[in-house]
């Protein structure tokens, strides 16, 4: 019953755009400055094949420094080839995401090295079975719209991490699977495995149920050798790809938010252009993970309001270029499920969703500077995302919702409790929280006075106590175990 109620309240793909931290003239200034960076400063391209692609397309290449300078016309021509909408498929139709414009979807993020163990309450190194637990929890939380592989299990290596992370996602989730990748061979084996699940390689190309994240941009103004190679491998496989960058105010970008946005814009557009040089028209996301460092000790911050501001502004820039955006929100620097975890996550999630961030990753599950994943935090963030999406949906105004005919029937001094209009709209108009407490104090006390953390843990235990469900046929799983090297068969 609980899960059915979740589905009734789930909102996804609502169109944001009502929150605009940048006026149009400031978008133009950032765009114009970015073009000057491309033509006057340039981007250092460390990958030989990528360097040749830029040179063959007409960019000015300094072979000694590997600096590539690109004129505005070429920049705009290349990014115009990127599709303005991208469809990310789930295994079932209700989990298919039509991404573009100002439509907002929120999901998990990756790749944390630790988990907050829900059994002990203690932080520990992440292990592969933890991905199964996270996948099962996310599968049951309908406000989390996609499953981004959230942790890097400590027992895995670069040689087998890709197949096992994606393998768990494909086995235990019906939602779209997104994840960072670490090796060319891993990409090829994930593609092979996903093709087996989809039915064929062509079926996977037609309905991609996986997408990949390749952080090829290293701020400021560098395309990394290894991750550029991964980007080229992804796009030639027909897999939707994200080329995100993470400039940090005061460290790898100017301390000012405007300066960070220029670095962010240049670095992710460089990745978009590389993808289009390799495969024109390939689905690629504008990627924003911009944040800042604590100027007292230079540590990375994930829960700062400025991170939300920059991701919201980046959504406006992506909309300006008509490229779907992979944006960031929802993390907290808190070490546990407390008020800080709630307000930091809620503020940034709401800002980016209202701005029309398309794929909002990290919106569920992360604590402690993005280093720790928490099952209870997924439950808390499911509630936050649900409320944020209700805000994005906004207020529907038409003859039916204005309810003048109902008011005439009720008249002065009447009530609307028993009106058919109330029954028709009460579930559509009001978001019904699954975690927030709306009982009286007496009812709450009689239930044991549970706080939010306790209620979230109870929900986690409820989900994990249910029978384990694999979403792939046994025959396909057996074939994966036999034919995909590096698979840990005990968990797939």
Image (cartoon, rainbow, N blue to C red):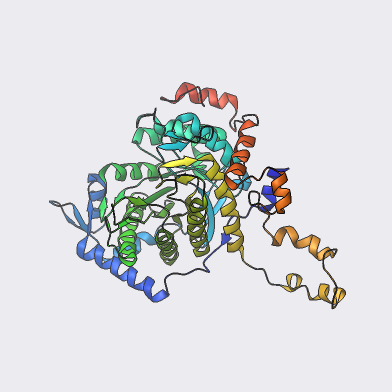
Asked if residue 411 is positioned above or below residue 349 in the image, the reply reads below
Residue at (49, 36) in percent of width and height: 201
Residue at (72, 45) in percent of width and height: 446
The number of numbered badges drawn on the structure is 0
Residue at (56, 48) in percent of width and height: 380
Q: Which of the two residues, 369 or 82, is positioned nearer the viewer here?
A: 369
> Residue 231 appears at what percent x and percent y?
35, 45
> Residue 169 appears at what percent x and percent y?
51, 36
> Residue 137 appears at what percent x and percent y?
58, 39
Res 275 seen here: no
Asked if residue 336 is positioned above or below residue 342 in the image, the reply reads above
Residue 179 lies in what quarter of the image? top left
Res 38 seen here: yes
Q: Which of the two residues, 451 or 257, is positioned nearer the viewer here?
A: 451
Report the residue that reaches farthest toward the left.
64
Q: Which of the two residues, 351 or 67, is positioned nearer the viewer here?
A: 351
Quadrant containing the N terminus is top right
Residue at (84, 65) in percent of width and height: 419
Query: Could you tell whether 269 is left or right of 191 in the image?
Result: left
> Residue 418 appears at what percent x and percent y?
85, 63
Q: Which of the two residues, 87 or 258, is positioned nearer the viewer here?
A: 258
Query: Could you tell whether 339 is left or right of 47 in the image?
Result: right
């Amino acid at each position: 019953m609980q899960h059915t109620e979740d589905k009734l309240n789930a909102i996804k793909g609502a169109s944001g755009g009502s929150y605009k931290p940048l006026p149009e003239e400031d978008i133009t200034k950032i765009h114009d400055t970015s073009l000057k960076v491309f033509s006057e400063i340039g981007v250092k391209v460390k990958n030989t094949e990528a360097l040749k692609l830029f040179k063959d397309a007409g960019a000015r290449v300094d072979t000694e420094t590997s600096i590539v300078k690109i004129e505005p016309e070429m920049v705009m021509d290349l990014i115009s080839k990127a599709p303005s909408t991208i469809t990310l498929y789930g295994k079932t139709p209700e989990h298919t995401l039509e991404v573009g414009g100002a439509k907002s979807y929120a999901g998990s993020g990756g790749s944390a090295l630790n988990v907050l163990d829900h059994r002990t309450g203690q932080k520990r190194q992440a292990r592969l079975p933890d991905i199964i637990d996270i996948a099962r929890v996310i599968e049951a939380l309908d406000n989390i719209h996609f499953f981004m592989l959230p942790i890097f299990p400590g027992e895995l290596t670069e040689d087998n991490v890709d197949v096992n992370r994606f393998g768990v996602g494909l086995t235990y989730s019906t939602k779209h699977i997104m994840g960072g990748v670490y090796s060319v061979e891993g990409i090829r084996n994930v593609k092979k495995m996903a093709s087996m699940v989809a039915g064929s390689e062509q079926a996977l190309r037609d309905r991609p149920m996986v997408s990949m994240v390749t952080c090829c941009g290293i701020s400021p103004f560098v395309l990394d050798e290894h991750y550029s190679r991964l980007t080229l491998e992804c796009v030639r496989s027909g897999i939707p790809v994200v080329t995100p960058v993470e400039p940090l105010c005061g460290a790898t970008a100017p301390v000012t938010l405007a300066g960070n946005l220029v670095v962010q814009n240049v670095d992710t557009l460089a990745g978009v252009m590389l993808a289009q040089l390799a495969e024109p028209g390939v689905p690629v996301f504008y990627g924003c993970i911009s944040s800042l460092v604590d100027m007292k000790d230079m540590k990375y911050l994930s829960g700062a309001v400025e991170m939300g501001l920059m991701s919201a502004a980046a959504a406006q820039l992506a909309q300006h270029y008509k490229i779907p955006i992979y944006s960031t929100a929802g993390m907290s620097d808190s070490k546990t499920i407390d008020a800080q975890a709630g307000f930091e996550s809620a503020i940034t999630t709401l800002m980016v969703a209202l701005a029309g961030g398309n794929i909002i990753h990290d919106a569920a599950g992360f604590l402690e500077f993005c280093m720790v994943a928490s099952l209870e935090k997924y439950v808390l963030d499911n509630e936050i995302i649900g409320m944020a999406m209700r805000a994005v949906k906004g207020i529907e105004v038409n003859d039916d919702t204005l309810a003048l005919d109902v008011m005439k029937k009720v008249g002065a001094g009447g009530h609307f409790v028993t009106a058919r209009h109330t029954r028709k709209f009460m579930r559509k108009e009001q978001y019904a929280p699954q975690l927030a407490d709306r009982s009286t104090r007496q009812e709450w006390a009689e239930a044991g006075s549970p706080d939010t953390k306790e209620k979230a843990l109870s929900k986690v235990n409820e989900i994990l106590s249910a029978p384990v469900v694999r979403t792939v046929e046994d025959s396909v799983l057996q074939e994966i175990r036999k034919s995909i090297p590096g698979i840990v068969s005990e968990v797939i």
